[in-house]
Image (cartoon, grey):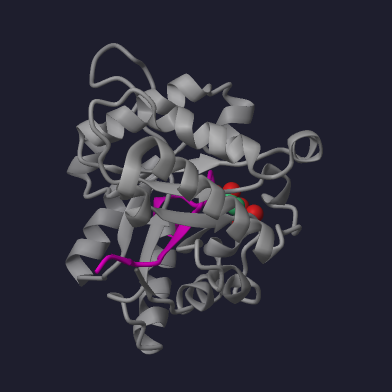
């Protein structure tokens, strides 16, 4: 029997210095503990900026909070003269478990190609990190191709050519739903997730059943339940609402056991 433990991940983007990050993690963890959050049932992950990772690690370790840590990006290189880059090895030393790869903001503002995303997935695998591969269509692409063609293509491109695939997560984030207050309909999100899963099954076989597929884009405590109802959605990737501890705790409390 296989289970996909739901993952609720908060991508803080370029917000909060390390002191503010400590305060938010502390507040979030205590809110979850007070509300008797079952950390085994729903994994909660914070994804602060690089500058707060060390503080997050120290705090989570000292207080034994059951929170996972993610990073927002990774270098495709192992080490060397790459000014400004952060390697997988550096991240894994900080107890980082997940890395956001190919977020639409990086594809859009930093020109990240499918090829670079693939290299970053490989860098994650090489350092024992789990990539959260972000995929999603723009409004224009939605109108010209429908919702699933781009997410399916981006997923398969990111998974191509690896010696062997290790654990990874896919986050379906329609670009037009990010930070806009607009959301994909839960039916559409589940349908895209189903098509992504079946494409992974077609190319890479049964590991597709283990892959967690998240929805992201204007998720809030008030709408999370509708997304989690779909059989193919295994959690959410949250931006703005993850900066508010009560709101994010509210999102994290949504329980779902997916048993295959
Ligand atoms: P919002 O939740 O602010 O729409 O952001 C979603 C996102 O980009 C998470 O990675």
Image mark count:
0
Residue at position x 42%, y 74% in the image: 27
Reply above or below: 116 against 195.
above
Residue at position x 27%, y 50% in the image: 97
Reply above or below: 157 against 204.
above
151 or 260: which is nearer to us? Answer: 260
Q: Position of residue 98 (x, y in %)?
A: 33, 48
Question: Was residue 9 drawn as part of the magenta stretch in this picture?
Answer: yes
157 or 245: which is nearer to us? Answer: 157
Q: Where is residue 127 in the image (x, y as percent from the top left)?
A: 20, 35
Which quarter of the figure has residue 190? bottom right
Which quadrant does the C terminus fall into? bottom left
Which quadrant does the N terminus fall into? bottom left
254 or 143: which is nearer to us? Answer: 143
Left/right of residue 189 with respect to residue 15 in the rendered view = right
Which quarter of the figure has residue 203? top left
In this rendering, does residue 170 appear at all? Answer: yes
Q: Position of residue 31 (x, y in %)?
A: 42, 81
Q: Where is residue 168 in the image (x, y as percent from the top left)?
A: 34, 45
Which quarter of the figure has residue 75? top left
Q: Give the range drawn in magenta.
A: 1-20
Furthest toward the top, the residue is 81
Residue at position x 41%, y 52% in the image: 47
Question: Was residue 10 drawn as part of the magenta stretch in this picture?
Answer: yes
Residue at position x 46%, y 33% in the image: 156
């Amino acid at each position: 029997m296989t289970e996909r433990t739901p993952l609720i991940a908060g991508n803080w983007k370029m917000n909060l210095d390390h002191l503010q990050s400590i305060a938010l993690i502390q507040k979030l963890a205590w809110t979850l503990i007070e509300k008797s959050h079952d950390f085994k049932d729903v994994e909660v992950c914070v994804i602060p900026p690089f500058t707060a990772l060390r503080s997050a690690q120290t705090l989570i370790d000292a207080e034994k909070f059951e929170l996972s840590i993610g990073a927002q990006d990774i270098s495709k290189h192992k080490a060397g003269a790459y000014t400004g880059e952060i390697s997988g090895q550096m991240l894994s030393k900080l107890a980082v478990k997940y890395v956001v790869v190919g977020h639409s903001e990086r594809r859009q503002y930093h020109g990240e190609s499918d090829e670079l995303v693939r290299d970053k997935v490989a860098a994650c695998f090489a350092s024992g990190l789990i990539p959260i591969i972000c995929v999603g269509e723009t409004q224009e692409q939605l109108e010209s191709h429908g919702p699933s063609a781009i997410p399916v293509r981006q997923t398969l491109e990111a998974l191509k050519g690896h010696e062997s695939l290790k654990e990874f997560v896919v986050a379906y984030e329609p670009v037009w739903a990010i930070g806009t207050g607009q959301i994909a309909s839960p039916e559409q999100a589940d349908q895209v997730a189903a098509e992504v899963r079946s494409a992974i099954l077609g190319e890479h076989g049964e590991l597709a059943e283990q892959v967690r597929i998240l929805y992201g884009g204007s998720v809030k405590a008030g709408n999370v339940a509708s997304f989690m109802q779909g059989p193919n959605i295994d959690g959410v990737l949250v931006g703005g609402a993850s900066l508010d501890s009560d709101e994010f705790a509210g999102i994290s409390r949504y329980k779902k056991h997916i048993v295959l």
